[in-house]
Amino acid sequence: QVQLVESGGGLVQPGGSLRLSCAASGRTFSNYAMAWFRQAPGKEREFVAAIPWSGFSTVHADSVKGRFTISRDNAKNTVYLQMNSLKPEDTAVYYCASGSWRTILVISTLEYWGQGTQVTVSS
């Protein structure tokens, strides 16, 4: 069993930066791939980035590539999302999730989710 607790969201101006963290509990965390999703009000939840348990590869959505970076520290049972050059359209609730790397982009297959953290980009 895995529990995920997110932190790091907040209000930031366009062009600013935030780093989101997701701390996991449970001895199986290091064996799970991790991903970040986001959901704006009235919109579907969308994929942001994912990383396998090894941390040796990553995938980022085209909309955030070059601006956001996912990483993980298995020793700390934590996954991060470094967000730079933030835009108003990045405003959303950001969720971390864990599951099989094979289907990490498929929301319906993900078993564990964090509570979500609000990111608001506004001047």
Image: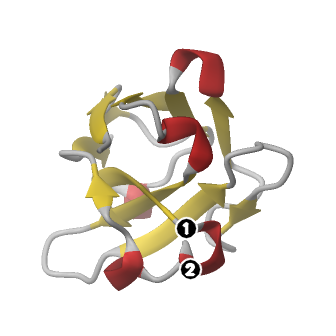
Q: Position of residue 40 (x, y in %)?
A: 24, 68
User: Which residue sits furthest left?
Assistant: 42
The x, y position of residue 62, in whole percent, is 69, 74
CA separation in Å, label 2 and label 1: 6 Å
Mark 2 residue type: Thr
Is 48 placed left or right of 6 in the picture? right
Q: Which residue is mark 2?
A: 103
Residue 100, which numbered label? Answer: 1
Q: Residue at x 64, y 25 (%)?
A: 73
Residue, x 13% and y 80% (percent of image)? 42
Q: Is residue 44 above or below residue 114?
A: below
Residue 16 appears in the figure: no
Image vertical order of residue 98 relative to residue 104, above or below: above
- Label 1 environment density (alpha carbons within 10 Å; few <14, some 14–19, many ≥20): some
Asked which secondary structure carries label 1, the reply is loop
- Does residue 42 appear left or right of residue 43 in this picture? left
Q: Residue furthest top?
A: 76
SS of the residue at dot 2? helix
In this view, the residue in front, 107 or 123, is: 107
Using the image, tell me which numbered label, if any, was put on residue 37.
Answer: none
Q: Residues within 10 Å of mark 2 (few under 14, many from 20)?
A: few
Contact between labelled residues 1 and 2, with CB atoms less than 8 Å apart: yes
- What is the total number of numbered labels drawn onto the structure image? 2
Instruction: Indicate the position of residue 120 as horizontal and vertical percent values.
Output: 28, 45
Place of residue 32 in the rendered image (x, y in percent of width and height, measured from the top left):
55, 51
Which is more toward the observer, 114 or 119?
Answer: 114
Which quadrant of the structure image shows residue 91?
Answer: bottom left
Among the 4 quarters of the image, the one containing residue 82? top right
Position of residue 27 relative to residue 44, above or below, is above
- Inspect the image, locate mark 1, and give the three-letter code of the amino acid beneath it: Ser
